[in-house]
Amino acid sequence: MQLSEENHQTVFLRSSEDAGESELAFFKRLDEELNKVISFYKTKVDEIGLLLLSVVCEIVNEVEELSKQRKTLIALRIKAKDPDYFGSSCIFSSRFTDVIQETKMRGEGKDKQRTGSDDLVK
């Protein structure tokens, strides 16, 4: 078999005079079927690659969300232990206060969604 970029084609080492017409037809048909199989599996590999990419993107988004939540929990733990801690350092104050505010805003939005759906259930 000769490997080419798109199609595979059988190469005969004997001259075509030695090979019968039926043999040539058989190998031509065999090459066509092989090319169909290769095309099918290339398509499947591409589909799986796209699916894998979308799963990885979802995981990355979830990791980013969990990282934000972790930072918020750290900031809240620090604030609970020492309420004046954020006031003493303006670096921590602005960074963690922004994270806390962002989390509060997201939480309020979720509470409103929950309240709205709870009203529908009642």
Image (cartoon, rainbow, N blue to C red):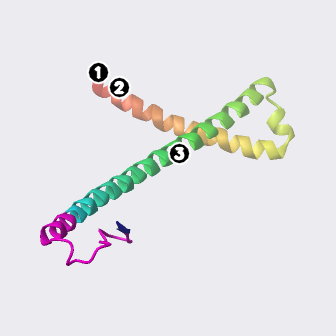
Q: Residue at x 44, y 49 (%)?
A: 54
Amino acid type, residue under disc 1 in the picture? Lys
* Cβ–Cβ under 8 Å for marks 2 and 1: yes
Of the image marks 2 and 3, the number of the one nearer the N terminus: 3
CA gap, disc 1 and disc 3: 34 Å
- Looking at the rendered image, the quarter that the N terminus falls into is bottom left
**Of 81 and 69, which appears nearest the observer?**
69
Residue at x 42% of width, y 53% of height? 49
Q: Where is residue 62 shown, x and y percent of the image?
A: 53, 40
Q: Is residue 54 left or right of residue 94?
A: left
Q: Is residue 27 magenta?
A: yes
Residue labelled with disc 2:
118
Which residue is label 1 attached to?
Answer: 122
Of residue 2 and residue 109, the one placed in the foreground of this image is 2
The circle on residue 61 is 3
Mark 2: few, some, or many residues within 10 Å (few <14, many ≥20)?
few
* Above or below for 107 versus 41: above
User: How much space separates mark 2 and mark 3, taking CA atoms?
Assistant: 28 Å
Report the residue that reaches farthest toward the left.
22
Quarter where residue 70 is shown: top right
Residue projecting furthest to the right: 88
Alpha-carbon span between mark 2 and mark 1: 6 Å
